[in-house]
Image: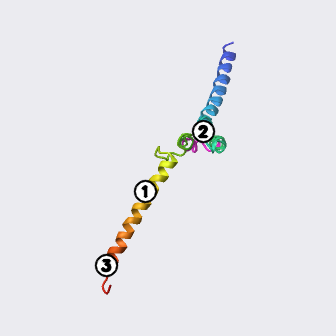
Amino acid sequence: MLDYVALFMLVFVVIVLFYGIIAIHDIPYEIAKKRGHPHQDAIHVTGWISLLTLHILWPFLWIWATLYRPDRGWGFKDGRSDHEHLASLEAQVAELKKRLDRYESDRSTNEPGA
């Protein structure tokens, strides 16, 4: 009787470990799906490939899945709206144009023979 209990425990532990590893490898995909990641299918496939490559890719999948956020995309926005960002860029261009005009006028007055 104890042989059957031991066999059942052995099979049970192997099955739990097998499904546990699969569940752990789906964590990056679940993160990507929750965030609406544009590459969630690629993350899911790479998670399965990671099972075959001794889990080397899995930490990179986690990073890849967590980089994207729906509210700010890839994290390169500074919190301003597109209109505010465009106005800031226009102000910078106007300032650079003034500086360039001032530089060119100073240069033309300081040239020899002018």
- Quarter of the figure that contains the N terminus: top right
Q: How many marks on residues?
A: 3
Q: Is residue 56 magenta?
A: yes
| Mark 3 element type | helix
Residue range highlighted in magenta: 52-61
Q: Name the residue at 39% across, 69% down.
A: 100
Query: For the residue marked with disc 3, what is the amino acid?
Result: Thr
How far apart in space, not on screen, are marks 2 and 3 (Cα)? 61 Å
| Mark 1 element type | helix
The relative height of residue 108 versus residue 102 in the rendered view (above or below) is below
Q: Which mark is residue 32?
A: 2
Q: Is residue 20 magenta?
A: no
Q: Quadrant of residue 70?
A: top right
Q: Name the residue at 61% across, 36% down.
A: 25
| Mark 2 element type | helix
- Give the residue pinned by disc 1: 91
Coloring applied to the structure: rainbow
How far apart in space, not on screen, are marks 3 and 1 (Cα)? 27 Å
Disc 1 residue crowd, few under 14, some 14–19, many 20+, Cα 10 Å? few
